Image (cartoon, coloured by chain):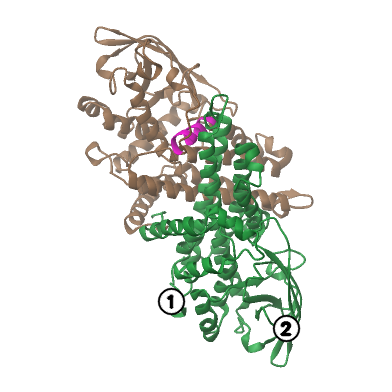
Amino acid sequence: MEFDLSKPQKLLKDSAREFLSRHCKPKRVRELMSTETANDDELWQAMADQGWMGLVIPEEHGGLGAELLDLAVVCEEMGNACLPGPFQATLFSAALIDRAGSPNQKARYLEAIASGSLKASVAQLEETGDWDLDAINVKAVRDNGRFVISGRKLFVPDAASADLLICLATNGESPVILPVSKDTEGVEIKSMPSMDETRKLYEVQFNNVSVNAADVFGADGNARGALVQATQVATVALCAEMVGGMQWILDTTVEYAKTRQQFGRPIGSFQAVQHQCADMLLMTESARSATYFAAWAVTEGAPNAGTVVSIAKAYCSDAFREVGNRGVQVHGGIGFTWEHDLQLYYKRSKAAETMFGDATFHRERIARAVVDD
Amino acid sequence: MDLNLTVTEEKFRNDFRAWLAVNLPPEWTGSTSGEDRAEYLRYLREWQQKLFAGGWAGISWPREFGGRGASLMEQAIFQEELAAANAPPLIGTIGLSLVGPTIIAIGTPEQKARYLAPILSGEEIWCQGFSEPNAGSDLASLNTKAVREDDAFIINGQKIWTSFAQHADWCLQLVRTDPHAPKHKGITCLLVDMRSEGISVKPLRQMSGDSGFNEMFFSNVRVPVSQVLGEVNGGWTTAITALMNERANLGTGSQVLFKRNLEALIRRARAFPRNGKPASEDPLVRQKLAQAYLELEILRLNTNRALTSLSKTGVPGPEGSIQKLYWSEWNQRTQQTAQEIFGPYGQLTDFDHGMWQYSYLRARGNTIEAGTSEIQRNIIAERVLGLPKSY
């Protein structure tokens, strides 16, 4: 048994950190968050050139065919840099197309995503804000050779910078996965201003949008299974990003506690402060263990992969928020300012907490697996 | 990253499992105190002798000293299998996991020849005389004095919280030999014969009812100079070596017991009523049980990561403090959850044979014994995060 990153994974992580420290400095994050979409096309292409867009896309479709843990270590560094823009949204889309798409659809979309020429986002949530697949209520109505969708999707991440929107609708029995080009007639995108300005949320209105039935993903009846699996991949990637955010807050807070002087000594020499930092370390490392394990379990196709992913997301959701709380507390007044970069991570933690379901949501999932008979 | 066991590890597990299937003694059903006590101790000693005869005692020790040279991962598997088989506790655990490895690391050839074999066989049981009434978390301020007189040290003073003292043959003891030196530099580690004249042992009853700890009183106890382990006035180094070995045992065995306890709680919650339904259908109970489950699972993952890292560096480090902090606080939270599920029944000493009230009370001591949570957080802050010392 060996629970550690491999040498190539450590190298990949180091190179991702080095790359982002040059191309995604905090100053750049702030510039981007004040733009309309928080997306930087040049940075996007540079990341695609690194191979990051296609990390878990199969080689036959222009990707690297790597393991989920490889993607996780890159996401960890993205979280450490508080990378703005639609990487996570596009990743979820790619994972979904990879599992639900026909060979032709994969050839058409995955290669474009891997090369950096296509950005995408999945439109799932509706008014209930419920991540359960059965909460999807927007109808896909069959009309001869086409599906027609009418309804409103909410909290769609990075919809304005995405070229492709993947609408999750229902035919009354099972989910229907519909690719909709953003400039399709009847699609209206409206901003939903929120805390985390590095990753924008949108309301997407579909007004009698018509999609060719042959273009729908998961037509072979596996739409639900593909959605479940793709959500696992995207959730692990998000957890990894959260771990990276926690690590940034921990490092920054410990550094501050070593240098900030009060009563003639560094505040990090006071146990009240030390114990906050010790707890932050415990939470960060525990979140990392849970996330790496989830990445491994999903790759291995473990029968309990769903529960393992829920364990990671439940823990990361609470831990990222709590590490943020303690980080701000140790910093004192400066930690509460707009000027200090802590606020970026603090807000990211809240956005990530609810994405794909918060801790309460995932604990209920775990309970169904281990508490119920 | 591969969380499956290697072929060697798998074989180790199968070998030990097969051995246990044949050799595990019947469960002890009598009392562990009062009149049954002597019989119970004989039962425990026999169990260790059996392990020794089968080559399963001191498995982490090098082969030249009678051990099995087992890897860290194999030690973890060993503990897991013992717990999974519901094996009796190891009466010689302090000798096996703490005293033996320390003697192997820094003992003289004569000490190795004299002490190691009886530790393995369970012939000699050890205790550890470290804490004192005024030296708990601040262990280095210990006050029990040893004065040199010809070829011996004469000990006077008191130790407390000593597990196994009431049936130990030997004690690994820290004493102050230079009262004028800075506190870490005047300590010596002695190997003390518990049958020496002038030692008296008084069991301390815990709030859970059992007597795991003792007070020990020393009045002009004579210990030959040849019984110094390590250097005179170098006992702090010896103590750290011993404590690192203690914490390198990352609690893989107790995790199996926790898992069994939580599974019992979940099973019980499916049948125990709450608001006209099984407690396991109550949303809040479900949340709490799921949280206990996920945290225990992460404890196991953290352990596996720490074991991997320890296997590579070979040096026990502060990982043990993170583990200790995590499991002790987990157990307190989980026992409180059990109490909430059972309501007024949880406190009864005959409800489920009193296991829930006992577990709740026993867990209270978890964040104090073997280094309080506060001390563990200090260690993490200073030794892992590099924050300045607070004292």
The tint chain A carries is: green
What subunit carries mark 1?
A
Up the image or down, A183 lies above or below B207; here it is below
Q: CA distance from mark 2 to mark 1?
A: 34 Å
The stretch in magenta equals B374-384
Q: Which circle marks residue A24 in the picture? A: none
Residue found at x 66% / y 71%:
A160
Q: How far across and down, in percent of the image, does residue A352 sit? A: 63, 57
Local secondary structure at mark 2: loop
**Farthest residue, direction bottom:** A144
Chain letter tied to brown: B
- Front one among B218 and A157: A157
Q: How far across and down, in percent of the image, does residue B372 sit? A: 52, 30
Type of the residue with mark 2: Glu
Q: Which residue has dot 2 on it?
A: A185
Is residue B48 located in the magenta-colored stretch of the structure? no
Q: Is residue A373 visible?
A: no
Local secondary structure at mark 1: helix
* Mark 2 closeness class: few <14, some 14–19, many ≥20 residues within 10 Å: few
* Mark 1 closeness class: few <14, some 14–19, many ≥20 residues within 10 Å: some
With A197 as the anchor, is B146 left or right in this view? left
In the rendered image, the quadrant that contains the N terminus of chain B is: bottom left
Type of the residue with mark 1: Glu
What subunit carries mark 2?
A
Q: Which circle marks residue A59 in the picture? A: 1
With B113 as the anchor, is B82 left or right in this view? right
Q: In which quadrant of the rendered view does residue B146 lie?
A: top left
Q: How far across and down, in percent of the image, does residue A200 sit? A: 66, 63
With A220 as the anchor, is B79 left or right in this view? left
